[in-house]
Each structure stands twice: as structure tokens, then as C-alpha cells.
Amino acid sequence: MAQSESKTTGNVHARENAAAEQAQDNHHPHGAQAQRDEEIEEIQRRSKHQPPGIQRPPDLPPASPRKAVTVVAIALAVLVLAGGVTLLLRVSHDHALAKETEQATIPTVAVIHPLAEKPNEELVLPGSLLAFVESPIYARTNGYLIRWYRDIGSRVKKGELLADIDTPEVDQELNQARATQQQAAAQLEIARITSQRWENLRKTDAVSAQEADQYASAFQQAKANLAAAEANVRRLEQLEGFKEVYAPFTGVLTRRNVDPGALINAGAQAPGRELFDIARIDTLRVFTSVPQAYATFIKVGEETNITLQELPGQKFPARIARTADAIDPSSRTLLTEVDVPNPEGELLPGSLGEVHFAVGSNVDRVTVPVNAMLFRAQGPQVAVIGPNNRVELRHLSIGRDYGTTLEVLGGLSILDLIVVNPPDSLEDGQQVNVAQGDESHATRAATAGAGAKTAGATDGSGR
């Protein structure tokens, strides 16, 4: 409190002194100016006698040229070394980044081993039952359908009448052709008589040889005209014969496409204009594709049998009729035809059946999961891990389909590592990373699926 009062008192005295000096300056302006000038002159005089603040450096002898060059060379070497180290660090960093990026672009895949399948002495393959002979029946003349005599499902014999066609235009053309034939015959007779007369006159030199030759040539031309007219008549008579449609062979009608009054166009080029479809079904053909691994066991003439799902427990005897004697490179299979006798017509053409072949048990077969397959234009493939973790796409020969797994008859062994769920972009020779720890899990899952399949495939057909 006392200090505050003293400060206040000091400030009051300072203001009073300042006011007094100001008042004195106001009363004596010339005296204050003179005093300030004296103070300035005193400060300048003192500054002249003070020593300078910055001293001059001592004089040194100049450096020699060799020493200067050495210093510059050392400085340049240090700069070059620093630049080289910086460049190497940058290149090393770029290489590391590129390698890391490349490693990041390599896909990681899960792999499993194919599972071995128990040997089986019977090969069961699907096949379509087809008529031994099947043919559409077209009209050979234009007209209108009068009536048909047999409908679908009718069993007909060779030469049996199937339909009648009315052909009024062909009838008129035939009448015209016959009239033209008569005209040609009359002209031929006149030409023959004229030629004989001129030939007799030529013998007496009554006419020139040129004129006699002209009438002889006219006679030959008339003969040719008559032959052409007769041929046209025979053609139209043949078309008249096609007014009645007959069965070309013994079989069953599987289709009828026309009704009475329908316009009939001749030929097979008319779209949808076939009158009937007829099939011979007393013997059926079954075409199936045998995998390459079993091709050596297929012998022409050997007995086999056919089964149908809708007729359980029934087996129809069959015989291997012929093979293609060549492996299809796209599917690696042998096209085989099996003939099935069908005298009672119990089997229907177009049905899907199964062909049972007796084959040896020394064919190595494995199963793979369905999600390991690649279905491309080249055929079914799997991705196998090769040396240096590079992908090898292999073509397969597929046997039976068990649903979750597929039977592979060739192209794989139980020692191969195949990729599960391969990406569609996977290519042959591509580098991949194999996922660690996924192989055993995927193999156990595939083993469980194959065990369930084996338990269900007790009849040898995969069902």
C-alpha cells in the first residue's frame, strides 16, 4: 500500500516537472534550442575518439594453385559421391517397389490333390436312342392336298399310300405337252416326205445338192423336235405320278404337317413343307462317346445292354455296331454306335438311356471337385500347379458326373496339385502363390464329398 502511494506521488512530481519544463520552453524558446545543439555537438565529438567496431582481418598470403585445384577436386568428388549414393538409393527403392507391386499382382490360389477312385469293371455312359432310319417326306409336284390316309403313330409298310394331291396346273401342262408332241410328229412326217422328194430330184440333177441337203437337215431337226416333245410329256407324266404320296420304307409316322386344302410346294427347299416324317424303329441306334482311356476295350460285335431310367430293372440287349475308329481331338472320346433290337416298339426314339460296357479294371480313374473345372472353348480343363508355382492347363477326359465331383479318366494323377475355384482369367504358364494351410482343408472337404458319392453309387451307374 505504501509502495502504491509512493509510485503515485512520483508520477505526480514527474508530470509537474514536465509541465514546468514545457512552460519554461514556451517562455524561452531560443534557450532550449541552443541547449539541444550543444548536446548534439558533444555526442559527435565523443564518437570521433571511439575505436571502430569492425576490425580489418589480417592479411594472409594467397593459396597456391595446386592446393586450390585439390580442394576443388575434393569438393567435386564429395558432390559426385553424394549424388551416386542418392541415385543408388532411389534405384533400389524403385526396384523394391516394383518387386512388391509384382508380388501383389500374383494371385493366391487354394489347391488340392485329386482323389483315387475304386476300379470298376463296368463303364456306364449316357446315349440318345435314335431311329435306325428317319426321313422327311416332301411333295415332288405343286398342288393342293386332297386327303391324307395315315396319321402320326401309324405303322405303315413300304409303298403304302399316304396322301393324294390335286395338281390342276400340271394336268394342263401335260395336255399342252401332248398336243405339242402331236404337232412335232406331223411336222416330222412332212419333213420326211419333202426330204425324200428332193433326194429323188437330186438323182436326176433337177435340183442342186445344196437344196437337197437343206431339206434333209430339216427332216433331222423335225426328228429332234419330236424327241424333245416326247421327253417333256414323260416328265409331266412323272409329275402326275407324284400326285399320290407313298411310304418309302416300312416304319412309323412320327409327324404330319399338312391338312386337306393346304397348298403344296414341291421340293425340300420349301420351309416347313414336309408332308410326313417316317422312322424305322424296329432297330434303334444309340450313339455315345467313350473316353479315350476305355477306347481299347470297345470291340465291334461285342454284346452290351441298354437301360432306361423310366424302366428300372430292365436291361435291353444290344450290340456294338461300329465306331468312328478315331479319337475326337476336342473331347478325347471315341464315337460309338450301339444297335438295339426293338421289334415290339417298347423303346421310343429320342429317349435318353445308359449304355453299359464291360471293360477292364486297370483304368486309372480319379475324381475332382466340380469347382476345380474350367469349361472353355477348348474343352474341360483343370489348372495344375507345376514347377516354380506356374500354372499348367490340362485337358481332361471326363467320365461320370457325381454332382459335386466329376470322374476323370485321363490327364490327372493323385500326385498333382489342382487349383480350386480358379479365376476365369487364369492362363497357361501364369505365376501364382499357393495359399498356406488351405490344401489340407480342401483335401478333407473333397474326401468327404467323394465318400458320400461312393456310398450313393452302389449300382455302378453313379446315381
Image: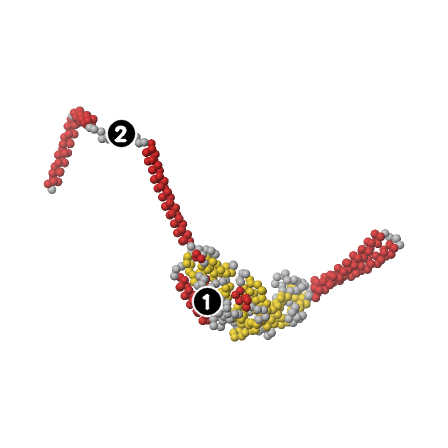
Horizontal and vertical percent position of residue 209: 84, 52
Report the side of 220 relative to 13 (left or right): right
Q: In this view of the protein, which residue sits in the foreground, 169 or 229? A: 229
- Tell me which amino acid carries mark 2: Asp
Residue at (22% x, 29% y) in the render:
52
Tell me whether the residue at label 1 lies in contact with that at label 2, contact meaning CB atoms closer than 8 angstroms. Answer: no
Query: Which is more N-terminal, label 2 or label 1?
Result: 2
Q: How far across and down, in percent of the image, does residue 212 sit?
A: 84, 54
Q: On residue 116, which mark appears? A: 1
Q: How crowded is mark 2: few (under 14 residues within 10 Å), some or many (20 or more)?
A: few
Q: In the rendered image, which residue does mark 2 sit on?
A: 59
Between 149 and 39, the one lying in front of the other is 39
Q: Position of residue 272 (x, y in %)?
A: 61, 63
| Residue at horizontal 46 percent and vertical 60 percent from the top | 384
Q: What residue type is labelled 1?
A: Ala
Q: Where is residue 353 in the image (x, y as percent from the top left)?
A: 54, 70
